[in-house]
Amino acid sequence: MIQVFQYPHETLMQVSTEWKSEDSIVGYDDVERFETDMIKLMLDERGMGLAANQIGITKRFFAIGHDSFDTFQKHAIIWNPQVINSSEEKVIDVEGCLSFKDVFVKVERPKIIEVQYETTQGKTRFAKLNGMESKCFQHELDHLDGITFNKRVSKLRWQMANKG
Ligand SMILES: [Zn+2]
């Protein structure tokens, strides 16, 4: 059974490696069944994104999806995601993380991003993301680089957020 690890679990600090088509998930015969389980876990935890290393797998993929999103309205796992362009304009908005229970903190990030990723079927896709969807993608991509959101804010802001 897969589970969400809490900070400071060791895989949260590791840089994940590329997902290759011949790769497989330990404990799963097919990727589709794993995808179903990972998305279910994300929804059970009330998340809109869940990175592979949050469940202990240091490969470059994450689950993403929310009714309010434009591109990822339907929940999906995306593979080898990348940001290929980011807007100069930044926004500061509140973020939460399934690996930090009950911590919500304002994080500054580029407003609009252009991204590339692979679908479970191995197709390369491009999209332009804005709003919460852009923020969520950047938050999850940070995970794959071993960067948790406490690293994106000042010490003071982090301490304030943890006081609730
Ligand atoms: Zn997170």
Image (cartoon, grey):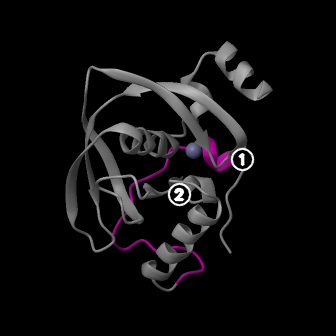
Q: Residue furthest right?
A: 163
Nearest to N terminus: mark 1 or mark 2: 1
Q: Going 55% across and 36% down the picture, which residue do you hit?
A: 95
Name the side, left or right, on which 119 lies relative to 40. left
Image coords of residue 10 (percent x, y):
69, 46
The residue where tag 1 is placed is 9
Q: Going 44% across and 78% down the picture, which residue do you hit?
A: 31
Image coords of residue 105 (percent x, y):
61, 29
Count residues near mark 2 (Cα–Cα under 10 Å), then give few for <14, some for 14-19, many for 20+. many
Numbered mark located on residue 145 in the image? none
| Mark 1–mark 2 distance (CA, rounded to whole Å) | 13 Å
Dividing the image into four quarters, tell me where ligand 1 lies.
top right
The residue where tag 2 is placed is 52
User: Does the magenta portion include 12?
Assistant: yes
Count residues near mark 1 (Cα–Cα under 10 Å), then give few for <14, some for 14-19, many for 20+. some
Q: Nearer the viewer, residue 121 or 97?
A: 97
Residue segment shown in magenta: 10-28
User: Does the magenta portion include 139?
Assistant: no
Q: Which element type, helix, strand or loop, lies under badge 1?
A: loop
Image coords of residue 137 (percent x, y):
40, 45
Image coords of residue 76 (percent x, y):
40, 65
Label 2 within 8 A of ligand 1 by Cβ: no
Q: Nearer the viewer, residue 54 or 158?
A: 158
Give, as a three-letter code, the residue at label 2.
Ala
Q: Which element type, helix, strand or loop, lies under badge 2?
A: helix
Asked where in the image residue 2 lies, by quadrant, the reply is bottom right
Asked where in the image residue 153 lies, by quadrant, the reply is top right
Residue 67 versus residue 90 in the image, above or below: below
